[in-house]
Amino acid sequence: MTTELTRNLGVAGIVLMVVAAAAPITVVVANFPLIILESGSVGAPLMILAATVILLLFSVGYTWMTPHVPDAGAFYAYVDRGLGRRAGLGTAAIALLSYVLLTVSMTCYLGVQAGNLLALWTGVALPWWLISALMIVIVGLLGYRKIDLSAKVLGVVLVLEIVAVVAIDLGVLFSGRALSVAPFSPVEALSGAPGLGLLFAFLGFFGFEATAVFRHEAKDPLRTIPRATYIAVILIGVLYTVSAWLVISGLGADTALAAATENPDGVIVALAGEVVAPIMADIAQLLVVTSMFACMLGFHTIVTRYLFTLGRRGVLPMSLGQAHPTRRAPSRASLWVSGMTATIVVVSALAQLDPVVEIYTWYSGLGAVGVIVMMALTSIAVVRFGATHHAAPASKPVLVLTGIGGLGLLVVLAISLANFPLLVGGAVAAIVCGVILVAAFLAGGLAPKRSVSTDGLVDTVHR
């Protein structure tokens, strides 16, 4: 078995993977109402803009350090280089936990949305878990094959999503409805529970680290990764900021909160039907399903690449770091991700958790906190590495901008944690979630590391 993957992804291919994982139409239709609802304000555009600026600052150090990180472990590999192996392995454990939870949350929500659409169009009602199981199989088959097939699927879906989002934006713009500046008011954004709004604003960007996760499949990693990172963050940030402003204006700045509270699942779909054409509501519902599928596939590929890299480095069984002999894809790692996703979905369904109110909200919330923790650790690692790496130290602007971005992430993390009990239904549940993250980090840091020879064989195991 070989450990080398096919290098056929350029900047456009990686950007497609990243933005598709961000799921634009899903963010607009599903996350925007949640940002408004959970924050208790219409400050979503300013929250998204703040997230964009913080991520761009973060990207300065992230892309600078790219040549010094040979692995595709993304956050884990950066923390490993900057803060040491134990911290790196702890970050890897948080990454796996967070992205698996995000994959599961999207899988369950997809089951609900696809089921609703099927019932609306055919009158056939199927349980959400059955549809989710089918989606796991389809995603597993795509993940088993080469990345270019997944990129093509995501590319088609993404183009349709962006066209739909732009259509809704233009519909509002030309509908004659008043365009309010209230969503950009700092006072408005800081009212209510801004931490939860920021948390779900960042959730719309998650998956952008895939620019580094696909390192082993990039044609020219040293050029492809930095360019794809900046393009992805700017594209997502501009699209979401403008769309959030126009959507809130379309709903009415004074009534958007009430509308999102009354009907969070359908308020944007109804708006699309009003400002574009009645058929647009049906198109938006269909695209939400395909978008969630693309998001699920995107998260699946990210977890797969984490397992593949950890297998290559000897942290996990070496078999996970082996590529398929003919497909040159991390097929075995992909099977493991499908298995983990299916297991958690089955357990959650047997526990009779609500797929939206509990599974999606809790799992994605915890996954979002985990990703922000990883990003904060990565910022610290970049600053430390850049300041102490004597052979090629980072310039002062890189260190300062990265430090500001890291500080911003720590502030977002602190505000999110302060408001997290409101999301999961109490302080006890929030503490349990915190304990899970800490336990994952500590367990990862204690994982054994095998020394891997050049022929891929494991020589020894170290503690």
Image: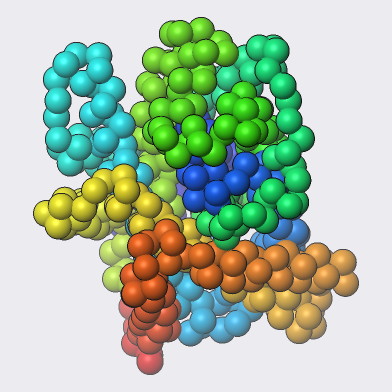
Q: Residue at x 73, y 75 (%)?
A: 383
Q: Looking at the image, which residue is at 58% across and 26% down?
A: 251
Q: Check the image and tell me how it is coloured.
A: rainbow
Instruction: Answer above or below: position of 215 versus 456.
Output: above
Query: From this viewpoint, which residue is outermost toward the right?
Result: 396
Q: Where, by quadrant of the figure, is residue 366 drawn?
A: bottom left
Place of residue 54 in the rendered image (x, y in percent of width and height, measured from the top left): 71, 57
Residue 208 appears in view: no
Q: Is residue 388 above or below residue 116?
A: below
Outermost residue toward the left? 350
Residue 285, image x and y in percent?
Answer: 39, 22
Which residue lies at the image location 73% right of the left edge and 38% below the top edge?
182
> Where residue 33 appears, x then y in whole percent?
50, 38
In the image shown, does 47 or 236 lie closer to the viewer?
A: 47
Relative to 236, residue 431 above or below? below
Q: Can residue 276 be seen by looking at this rendering?
A: yes
Q: Position of residue 183 (x, y in %)?
A: 70, 40
Q: Name the image quarter holding the C terminus.
A: bottom left
Front one among 445 and 441: 441
Q: Is residue 144 left or right of residue 170?
A: left
Q: Quadrant of the N terminus?
A: bottom left
